[in-house]
Structure formats: structure tokens, C-alpha cells
Amino acid sequence: MEVEGDTPRKFHKRPSVESVSYHSRVLQDGCISSSDLEDSLNMRQQHALNMLGLMREMHSKQVLCDVSLVVQGQTIPAHRLVLASCSPYFNAMFTSNLKECHEKTVTLCEHDAEAITEVVKFAYSGKLDLTEKNVQAILNAASLLQIEPIISTCCEFLKTQLHPSNCLGIQSFADSHGCFDLQQAAESFARQNFTKVATQEEFSQLTAKELIKLIEHDSLNVTREEEVYKAVMNWLKHDWEDRKQHIGDIFEYVRLPLLSWEFLTSQVVQDKITDLSERCHRFFDEARRFHASEYYPGLHWEVNVRTIPRDSFKQCQYIYVIGGETRPSRNTLCSLERFHPVLNNWVSLPPMQISRRGVGTVTYENKIFAVGGANESPLRDVESFNIQTETWWSVAPMHTPRSSVASATVRGKLYALGGYDGFTSVATAEEYDPHANEWTTIADMNTCRSMAAAVAYEGCIYVIGGYSGSSDLSSVECYNPMRKEWQNVTSMTSPRSMMAAAVLNEKIYVVGGCGMSGSLSEVEYYDPNEKMWYQVRSMCNPRSGLGLASINYKLYALGGFNGSTNLETVERYDEVEDSWKVVSNMPAAIYRFGCCTGR
């Protein structure tokens, strides 16, 4: 091997040592082969694993242990070298002139013994056994001992555990331990799920400063500013005497101008916030001027944080109505209509290529899929509507023609479930991969069903009720795509077909339909946690063949057949008040149409 210079010099390899089993093989160009390098790397990794395994065995047998950690009266033996190599905290302790450098025991105060034990196990194994119960104690211990791999692993674990009931506590915990990424993730989760977070005990325990930090963001995910106002008032009332002093500071970040005029002049006036703070009086007057400017263009108002819509207001969800059937002419439609629930207006969009009634519809990746249905006969055809470009495209057809088909999407796949094939109600089901543009047959349902409803919840698909070919059904079954199997769950309180279903606040609502008495107005919901059905307030009108959408924490029931004629009305359900209210009219009175939501 030659080295550049005035006079090339030759370097000779030292003879290999017999105890070393690996020998480098030098190629003609002076390079070591990649396979030999890989062998060398594998040998070193194996050597490290062997060493770690030996130290773990010595630790378990307490061989050559030279220090004991005392935590909560419990003694944990260990090796200084192992602790020092794993923890900068112990490294500094054992390599300095601190008294612990020479002592046989080190006492760790205010720490959990089980957590320290788990950390010591990690030092010898590189493995960590995390649970919901021990993760915070382990993260606390790892922060003291400065063990970065444990800290990052605990933070990633806590991110997976974020929930409306604990995200504020995790945010505070992360902030106090300097875990910036976790703190940011928890804060973002709280803003994204604000409406649910605001009902939790942790929310009522926030300080005024923490509350302001939460509600001031444009990214706070609410559909109406009324949700922020109500949350703030509930927080104030939780400890009114102590918290009313902060009312002016807090309402600087509640966007009163964006409240509805009705809410502003009724609820806000009733709460008398203007009597408690001069600043609140100014904010209220600002809101009145903002609303008045719509009728008096010369009336000016200041553009500030309170008059700028939040990001979620700008990304309103729409309700889409696809196809359907008119009465009494019984025309099958190819239309696509979009409803804006906040502005309460309808817009016609490009129609489908094929007219369809009894069509299944789902939204996936900013596309609407119209699945099957019937024209003169049941269809296999499937179309996709790109919401952004407002264009329809044909995609792969199903294996089986399906009218009155139930459909849902979960884990990136679309599902067509049951339906009427032109002869009878079927139990067959198919799965569509949008990226491969391919349908695959999956396990049959336990019961033949057409005119059923389907929803996706927690990674599974629930298919509800329907018509068996001889009678209406009350049974419900659940498909787990991971296990590829169907399982019967609790039946509804009464059989029904041609109903609609949607998920609202972790409950599966079933609305209207057709039963023994004809078109139904009854509403019930299934609690997947309790595995029970509960009845709630009935709709204003009986409806079968209706559409149902869950949007902005409300249910919208659209159209349908009342037993004598088609309906064009739209009803909205408020879960808190358990009440239905007619809020709009559709462009036409139709039933047996597809209904879904999208941006």
C-alpha cells in the first residue's frame, strides 16, 4: 500500500492474531470488500450484544456490583461502569470528587422505586417496558438521570396516549420536564380537539394564563365562536369569585364579533359580562359595530385578532347529496349538490356520468366515490368525483352489481357491503384499494342485507339493520379489517331498513328508516363502549331513504320519504339539547340518494 509523497514508502501488515477470526481481504484496487466490512460490523455488533448480555447476567446474580441505589427504602444493586456509560448524571457523579464517587450507596430522593428499577434494567438491556401507569414516573427519572433514549421513547409513547381528558396534563408535564416536542404535540392536540377538551376536568383547572394561551390561536379548531365563549364562561363559573378578576384579559381573545347576532344579543347580554369589566364593554361594543357594518357600510370597525376568522372557519365542511329518486315521477337522478351548513346555501356541481338511486357514497382523500346503486337495474359501476377539480372519473367496477348498498371507508380502503343484486339481498362484501384501483372480495357478512346503513368507527365497520329479502332487520354486525372477520354486536331496539347512520361524539346514531308502521321518525344511538342502544328525541318528520351527515358536532337529516311524499326539508340535531329543528330546504324533494361530507 503506497502513500503519496516524494519517495513512496511501503507499509507491511502486521501478522494476524490467531484469536481474531476476521481477516480483511484487500482487493486489487486497495479497497476492502463490502462483504468483509459488513462481516466486521456484524462481529462488532455481536460482540456488543454479548458484552451486554454478560453484564445483564452478572447484574441479575449481583456479581461484582459496586454500588447500590436507594429509592423509597428499596435497594437496587448495580455497576458504576454501566450506570456511568448510560447516564451523564451518573457519569459526572462517579468520575468527580463528589462523595458519592466512593460511597457504596447512592440515595435518590423523591423518585419512584419502580421507575428507577426500570431505568436500571434499561441500562443493562436497552429495553423499556412502558405502560400508561409508569411512563410519567420513568420519564421523570430519565430526565433527572439525563438518559436521552429513554426520554425520547417516553415522549413518543405519551404522544400515542393523547386524549381530550389528559392532553392538558401531558402538556404541563412536558413543559416542566423540558420535552419541547411532546409539549407542542399535546398543545396542538388540545387545540384540534378543543370542544371535547373544554368539557374535561383538566380544562377547569387551567390558570388564566394557560387558558389565554389555548384560545388565542387562529388554529383553535371550532366551528363557531360560540363554542369558545361557552367554554370560557364555564371556566369562569368553576371558581367565579377568584376568576372574575381575569375576565377582561380573557375576553380580549374571545372573538365576540364572530358570534351570531342572536347569540350576542341574548346569551352574552344575559351573562352581563359588560357589567364586570370596562374592557368587556368595549369588546361588546366592537362586536355590535361589526354586525351593524353589514347594514351601514360607512360604519367602521378595527381589524384585529377578534375580527379575524379562525382557520377552522375558513375550512368549513360541506354536505354532498348524490343522485337519488323523485316522486311521483320516479326519475333517477345523476345530480350532485353541495350544502354549506353555516351559510345555509346549496350549490349545484357537475353531475355523475350515470344516474343512480340507492347509491353508496364515501369520501376519501378529497374525492367522493359513488358506488353501485341502480338505474334500470343494479349497477357494478363506480365513479369518483375530485372535489378540487370538480370532475368525475370512472374507476374499476365491483365484482357484483349492488343497489341499496351500504358503504364505508376505513384504513385507506373503501367497502361495499351487501345490497340487492337484481334477484335478492346479498351478504357478500368487497374492498376497494384506491391506489391500486382494484376491488377484492372479503368475508361475507353473517346476514344478507340490502337497504342497510354503515359507518366506520375506531378502525372497524358497523353494518346496521336493513332488509334481509323477507323482513326488516334489527341486527348489527362489525367487520374488523385487521382480523378480516365479522362479529355480531348488540341489536337495535327495533328493526328498520332504508335508514341512515352517522357517528357523533363517539356514538353511532341511527335515524329514521322504514319499519312495521311505515316511515319512521325515531332515533337511537349505539355506545360502542357500553355496547348498548339508547333512544333519543325523534325527528320532526318521519323519513325513510334519507341522508344523514355528522358535521360541526351536529347531525343533519336530509330529504327522504314520509310515507306519502318525498321531503325537501333538512333537520339539525343538537345532542346537548336533545332537539331537532328544521334549518333548510333541499333544491328538490328526493329520497334514496347518497350523502357524505367533505371539504
Image (cartoon, grey):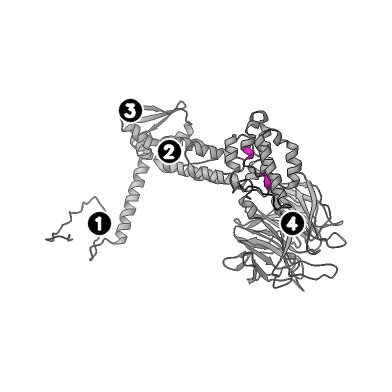
Q: Earlier in the sequence, mark 4 or mark 2?
A: 2
Q: Quadrant of the N terminus?
A: bottom left
Q: Position of residue 129 (x, y in %)?
A: 49, 41
Q: Quadrant of the C terminus?
A: bottom right
- Specify the segment rendered in magenta: 250-258
**Tag 4–tag 1 contact (CB < 8 Å):** no
Residue type at the position of mark 4: Asn
- Circle 2 packing at 10 Å, graded few (<14), some (14-19), many (20+), is some
CA–CA distance between discs 2 and 3? Answer: 25 Å
| Residue nearest the observer in this picture, 416 or 243 | 243
Q: Quadrant of residue 242?
A: top right
* Residue shown at 15% from the left, 57% from the top: 12
**Tag 3–tag 1 contact (CB < 8 Å):** no
Residue type at the position of mark 2: Lys
Q: Secondary structure at mark 2?
A: helix
Numbered mark located on residue 344 in the image:
4
Q: Earlier in the sequence, mark 3 or mark 4?
A: 3
Q: Earlier in the sequence, mark 1 or mark 2?
A: 1
Numbered mark located on residue 98 in the image:
3
Is residue 253 one of those drawn in magenta? yes
**Side (left or right) of 76 relative to 28:** right
Residue type at the position of mark 1: His
* Residue shown at 25% from the left, 51% from the top: 20
